[in-house]
Amino acid sequence: MAMYSRLPGSVALITLQNPPVNALSAAVRQGIVDTVQRALKDPKVTSVVICGQNGKFCGGADIREFAGPMLGPPLVPMIHAIEAVDKPVAAAIEGVALGGGLELALGCHYRIAHSKALLGLPEVTLGLLPGAGGSQRLPRLIGLTAALDLITTGRHISAAEALKLGILDQVTDNNVVDQAVEFVRRVAGQPLDSRRLSTLPCPCPPDVDSLLDKAMVKGMEKERDLLTTLFNSGQARALQYAFFSQRVVGKWSLPSGASWDNSAARTISKAAVIGLGTMGRGIVVALALTGISVVAVETQEKQLAEASQAVPAMLQREAGRRSLATPPGVISFSSNLQDVSEVELVIEAVFEDMSLKLQVFRHLTSVCRPGTLLCSNTSGLDIDQLAAVTQSPGLVVGMHFFAPAHVMKLLEVVYGPRSSPEAVATAMQLGKRMGKVSVAVGNCPGFVGNRMLKPYLEQANFLLEEGATPQQVDEALEEFGFPMGVFRMSDLSGLDVGWRIRKEAGLTGPGVESTRTRQGRRYSPLPDQVCEAGRLGQKTGRGWYQYDGPGGRVARSDPWVHIFLEAYRAEHGLVARSIAPEEILERCLYALINEGFNILQDAMAAGPEDIDAIYVFGYGWPRHHGGPMFHAGQVGLGRILERLQHHHHNHPDVPHLKPSTLLRRLVAVGSPPVQTWREFINKERVHSQL
Ligand SMILES: C[C@H](O)[C@H](C)C(=O)SCCNC(=O)CCNC(=O)[C@H](O)C(C)(C)COP(=O)([O-])OP(=O)([O-])OC[C@H]1O[C@@H](n2cnc3c(N)ncnc32)[C@H](O)[C@@H]1OP(=O)([O-])[O-]
C-alpha cells in the first residue's frame, strides 16, 4: 500500500498505492510509516520523494473507514514523523492532494505539483475539519486569512493558485516525480528548520501570534478532540453518506438485470431539442456546454425568435462561469422538424400535454434516421405510451431535467419496460457529461421525485385546512433545512403547474364539484381555488404570499390568504387548531418518506441512495440530513412507522399515510442500516414477499 524504491542519486521514492485515489487507509498509513523509517535508516538515502500511483497523489483519509473503529497508525503522529525527518522529503503532487492528502504534503518539507493538480481541504463538505494538522500548518504557511478561506469553504484550488498562495514550491507541466527528484537532490543537505511548518510562528496579527504559538500543541489536541466529535455527529455521517450515494447512483441497475457495467453507451456528438420554452432552452445550453452540436427546434415563430436571442446569451454566461474542457457545441435554430434527420439523439421538451407529445414522437420517428434515441423531458407522463408510437420503442427513454436545466444537477433517466440497456446507458452517460447526477428510475406516474412530492404537498394543504398558515408550514420546513418551504417553492415554480396536472387528471376544473374528497380519498381543493382567484405565485405577484408585482421574489404574508382560509374552513365546517412544527414535519416528511418505501417496493428505484440523491440534488433536501431515506434511518424506522400509524389512524381517508409494507418488513427484521436495504429488498423480491 506504499511501495519503496531507490532511485539513482540516493533518492528514496515512496509511492502510495490504494486505487482509485490513494486514500489514506490503515494499510496505506502503515505503509508510509514503514517506508519512511526505511528511508531514514538507509545511509545511502539523502532525500525522499512521496508520490501517488495512477496519476493521483492522495484523495485524503479513507472515508469508508469513518464508520468503523480507526485501525492502523494515526495520521497526526505519522505526519509529524515525516516533518521531523532530517533528510529533505518532497511531495510530488499530481491529480489531487485533498484533505489528509494535502495535510500529508504539508508535513513534507517541499511540495512540487503538476500544473493540472487540484489541492484543497474539503473536510467541511463531509461535516468534518482538517484533522491531520492542516488547521495548524496551513495558516503557518499561507497566513490565517487565506487558510481560513480554504478550510471553511472546502474548495479545490488549482496548482497555479496554490503556488501563488505559497503552498507549492514548484509547478511543472512535465513529469512531476522527475521534477521532485531533481528538486530534492538539489536541496539535499540544506537546513530544514524553516521547512517544518508546525514549528513556525503563524503569520497573523501580532496580538494573536503569542496565543497561537502557545495554542500550537493545544491546537493539535483540540483539533483531534473536535474531529472525534465531528466524526460521530449525525451531520458528518449524513454528509459522508451523501458523498457515497452520489457515486452509487452511477452504478445503476435495472430490474431486467441490465446495469452500468454490462450496457454499452453511445457517445453523442449531435443532438436536437424540440420545444424552446424555459426547459428546452436550458437543455440546449446544457448539451452545448459539453461540446455537443445542437439543433434547437421551435415551431412557434415568436418563441423561436426569443429563444434564438436568449440561448446564445445563456450559453456565453455559463461558458464564462466554467472552465470548459472543450469549446461549446454549435447551436442551430429551426422551426422545421425535418432538420433533425441527422442527429443521434433528440430530447423533446414541449408543453406537458400527452397528446402534443405523442404527435411530436410520431413525427420524430418518421423524420429521424433509424437508431436515433428519442427522449422526453416529461416530468411524469408515461414514457411507454410515447415509446409505443415509435418504430424503435427500445430507443425511447425519459430524460427528466430540473429547472433551470443548465444549472440543476439532477437528471432522472426514466426507463420504460421496452427501453434498451443501450438507451439507458447512453442517457446516463450523457447526463454525466453534462455534469449532472444521473439517476435511473422506473416509469411510474411522477417517476421518483415528483411521485414522492405528491403526498408531501398534499399533507401541506391538509395542514392549512386544519389551522396552519403557509408561513408556519414553510418555517417548519426551512428550520429543518430546506432552502424553501413548500408554499414558497410552489409560488416560485407556479401554482398553475400542479393545477394543470390536476385538471388533466379530472380532479378539478369546470363541472367538477369542489368537495374535499375524490374517489373516496381526502382531497384539498384549496390550491385549485387559489388558482381560480388568479393567484399563480410569483409570476402573477400573488399566490400563497404576496410579492412586489408580477415576477417579484420577496414573499410577504398576504391578509387575503388568511381571510380566504378562514372562509374556506367556515364553508367546510372545519375548526382551526394550533399545529406544532413537529406535526408539520412528521406529516410532510414521513408521508414523503413512506412513498419512498413504496417506490423501492415497486422497484421504481434500485436503492435508497437513488432516492436520496434525487432529493438532495433535485428537491433541496438538506445535504446534512443525507436524504429522505437516510433520514428515516436516523430518526429510526420504528418511530417513523409508529408516527405514520398514528397519523393514518387520525386520517384514515389519506392512503399516503398508510405505512408501506417494506417499511413494516424492515422494522420487523430489526431496522437494519440504510446501506443494507438494497440487498434486503433484492432478497425479499427473490422470495417475492414484497
Ligand atoms: C484527516 C483529514 O483531515 C480528513 C479526515 C480527510 O481527509 S476527509 C477526506 C477528504 N477528502 C475528500 O473529501 C475527497 C473526496 N473525494 C473527491 O472529492 C473525489 O472523489 C476526487 C478525489 C476529486 C476524485 O473525483 P473523481 O470524479 O475523479 O472520482 P470519484 O467518482 O469522485 O471517486 C472515484 C472513487 O474513489 C472513491 N473515493 C474518492 N475519495 C475517497 C476517499 N477520500 N476515501 C474513500 N474513497 C474515496 C469514490 O467513492 C469513488 O469510489 P467508487 O464509486 O469508484 O467505488
Image: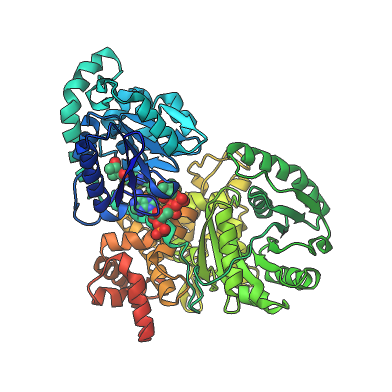
Q: Position of residue 84 (x, y in %)?
A: 21, 30
- The residue nearer to you, when weighing 339 against 335, is 339
Residue 347 placement (x, y as % from top left): 68, 62
Residue 33: percent from left, percent from top = 22, 44
Is the residue 47 above or below the residue 527 in the image? above
Residue 210 in percent (x, y) is at: 20, 16
Q: Residue at x 29, y 70 (%)?
A: 641
Please state if 151 lies on the left or on the right of 94 as rendered: left
Residue at image point 32% right, 73% down: 663
Q: Quadrant of residue 103?
A: top left
Q: Quadrant of residue 592?
A: bottom left
The residue at the point 24 percent across, 37 percent down is 79
673 relative to 191, above or below: below
Q: Quadrant of the C terminus?
A: bottom left
Q: Pick whichever, 496 or 198, lies toward us.
A: 198
Q: Quadrant of residue 423?
A: bottom right
Residue 626: tell me if it is visible: no
Q: Is residue 571 above or below residue 480?
A: below
